[in-house]
Image: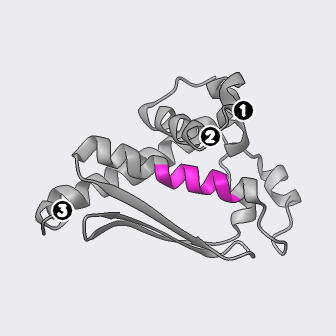
Amino acid sequence: MTEMSGFLRDLVAQTRAGDTYGQLSRFSDEQMLAPFVLTKEQRRAIPAACDLEAATEARVRSFYQAVAAATEKATGAFTVAILDLNHEGFGRVIIFAGRLVVVDEALRDIQRFGFDSLDKLGARGESLVIGATKVIDQYREVTRDDA
């Protein structure tokens, strides 16, 4: 088991935050992250031409909300993640800090959303946070609430 990095801790926190009835409190952090890890064979077994499952959409939303939260923690700039997905698993995620777009990604085949390992999950999240932080540092004045 990999050590929980800052991003993985943020992802667990975001996933637990969406649990309004406390149903997930009985699961360990590793169990909470397990659905984010899919082998290539598991991904291939998921049909791309099917409706998006609510659980998959929730995982995608938690992932990008964790990116936004970690970016906010790193920079102090208020961030918001906006996810727009259609029922076929296509869409876009945009993370804003003030009026500044710090992450903008097109999403495809979200039914197959997952990572080969926790290390790769953490690395992808950290990479997005580092990129967003660099953009905020470069254009700090646009992130202010009074801008």
Q: Residue 1 location, x and y as percent? A: 64, 22
Q: Residue 31 location, x and y as percent? A: 71, 29
Reading the image, the residue beneath label 2 is 20
Reading the image, the residue beneath label 1 is 23
Q: Earlier in the sequence, mark 1 or mark 3?
A: 1
Magenta stretch, residue numbers: 57-65
Q: Quadrant of the C terminus?
A: bottom left
Q: Amino acid at mark 3?
A: Asp
Spatial CA distance of label 1 from label 3 is 36 Å
The secondary element bearing badge 3 is classed as: loop
Residue lying at 24% horizontally and 55% vertically, measured from the top left? 134
Q: Residue 45 location, x and y as percent? A: 88, 58
The secondary element bearing badge 1 is classed as: helix
Reading the image, the residue beneath label 3 is 145
Spatial CA distance of label 1 from label 2 is 8 Å
Q: Amino acid at mark 1?
A: Gln
